[in-house]
Structure formats: C-alpha cells, structure tokens
Image (cartoon, grey):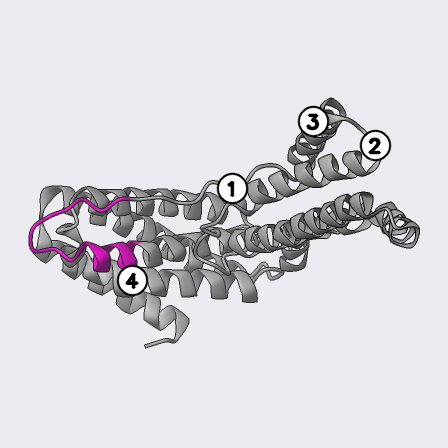
Amino acid sequence: MSDLLQRGRAWAPVLKSAALFVLPTPLLFAFVVALISGEFARFAAISGALLAFYGAGLFTWRALVAEARYFLGERLDLPAVPLKSASTVLTSSGAALAAAAGGYAIVGMLVFAVLAAAGYLSFYGRDLERRTFSVSAVTGVDAKAVTAQLKSAYGRLQGIDAAARSIAVPEFVDRLRRITQIGKSILAEIERDPRDASRARRFLNIYLDSAERVTTEYARTHRHIRNKPLEDNFRQLLIDMEQTFETQHQKLLENDLVSLDVDIEVLNTRLKRENRIG
C-alpha cells in the first residue's frame, strides 16, 4: 500500500463531516421565512436547530481529523473529550428542534431525535476508545514521570505500526506487528511495576525512538524499491529487534539489569548506524 493511498484512506472519512453542514440547508430558507413573517417562536427553534447541526458538524470534523492523524501516527492519543458523543447529542437536539419548528408535538420531536441519533451513529460510528493505563503507586517512584514515559513509548510503538502499514513486504509487516505486540507487553509490565521504568530507561528513552526512526525511514525510502541486499539487511535488523524486544521483556521479568542494558546498548548502536543518527 503506497503512502498516498494510506493517507487517502485515513483522511477520506473527514469529508463525511460535510453532511452535517449541507443537510440542514433547507432550514436556512425556513429561517428567513420565519424571520420575515415574525414567527419568533419558530424562528428561535430553527436557529437552535441550525446551531446544533453546525456544532455537531464542527465536533465531528475535529473527531475525524484526530482519528486520521492518530491512525497515521501523527498524534499520540485521541481527544480526551468524546467529540462524537457530543455530536450525537447535538444532532439529536437539532432534529428535535427542527421537528418543533415544523409543528410536531413532543412525541414527534422525540421520534425525530431518536432517528437522528441512530442515523448519526450508523454513519459516523462511535468515538474510538482512548488508550488508558494506570501506573501502580510505589513508594519512591514518580508515577507522573513514569506515566509520561509510557505515553511517549506507546506513541513510538504506534509510529512503528503506522510505518508498517506502508511497507509492501508482508513478512516485514508481520515482524513489525510482533515487535509492537511484545513492546506493549513490556509497557504493561512497567505499568504493573513502575520500578521497572528506571531499569528499562534506555529502552524507553533511546531504543524505541531509534527503532521508530529506522522503520519510518525504511518505509519512506524503500516503499517502491525491491532491492534484495537492502531487504536482507532490514530483515536481519527486524530479527534482531524482535529478539531484543523479547529479551527485554524476559529481563524485566527476571530482574536482570546488567544483561538488559548491554543487550539494548548493542542493538541501539546498530540502529543509530542504520539510520545515521549517531
């Protein structure tokens, strides 16, 4: 899959937010008629409906943009506010107010509100679930600092996943998927025992950054190039990365600090050489 196609697939849903700006257009004509005729109660209901629909459109646009950037690895997390849920409420309210402006009674307004909410959810879906993790409280450990480290580390793994989606070699995609799964197991272990964060400091602060850079650079420069020596070199690097991730996980479980740091330092040196960042 080319980078252009990947980005196109990520950004295409954003266009769907235009529906919430276009569909209420007939209300604009009703708005003008109510204003000219002096029907202020109807005018107020239509005004509220328009504001609700346009507000829902704005929130939906922001939600879809955030999802696209998250999918592409350009942002670490999804919005804290459930924007689609808020948009569902606004769309439902807009439909109810539009029904009121059309002369419907309470029952009719409720029917329109329910149908609008159901239509919104079927068309746009629900908010994606935000990544949540909780660092256990341990005496002498700065939980806030460890949480920041973990958030950054999850972002690095997300970046590797995003880069893998634009690599044309299925074997490499599978290897990278296994690497990120092991990485998530490592981070989960640190969540359970945040004291491991100091033992895995090189993995968290240096190695993951280098691994993401190398993977992203390979995906960018070799997307359309099938060069066997380059592929063989990257394949071996992925094998080493996977083994080091697995070793990191085992060392954390075994509490073997010295061996862990040595393993990480050796492979990180190679990653720097491969990406020319040293």
User: Where is 114 relative to 128, above or below?
Assistant: above
Q: Residues within 10 Å of mark 3 (few under 14, many from 20)?
A: some
Distance from Cα at disc 3 to Cα at disc 4: 56 Å
Q: Which residue is mark 1?
A: 128
Residue 165 in the image, given as x and y percentages of width and height:
54, 50
Q: Residue furthest top?
A: 107
SS for callout 2: loop
Image position of 66 (left or right of 186): right
Give the Cα distance between marks 3 and 1.
Answer: 27 Å
- Which residues fall within the magenta stretch? 134-150
When asked about the image quadrant of residue 253, the answer is top left
Chain-order first, disc 1 or disc 4: 1
Say whether disc 1 or disc 2 marks the residue closer to the N-terminus: 2
Q: Is residue 229 visible?
A: no
The residue that mark 4 highlights is 207
Position of 217 compared to 146: left or right?
Answer: right
- Which residue type does callout 1 highlight? Leu
Per the rendering, the mark at residue 103 is: 2
Nearer the viewer's eye, disc 3 or disc 4?
Answer: 3
User: Neighbour class for label 4 at 10 Å: few (<14), some, many (≥20)?
Assistant: many
Q: Of label 3 and label 2, which has the lower sequence position?
A: 2
Q: Are marks 3 and 2 in contact (CB under 8 Å)?
A: no
- Residue type marked 3: Leu
Badge 2 density bin: few <14, some 14–19, many ≥20, Cα 10 Å: few
Question: Does 28 lie within the magenta span?
Answer: no
Kind of residue indicated by mark 4 = Tyr
Task: Give the side of residue 202 with respect to residue 112, left or right.
Answer: left
Residue 137 covered by magenta stretch: yes
Q: Which residue is mark 3?
A: 110
Closer to the camera: disc 1 or disc 4? Answer: 1
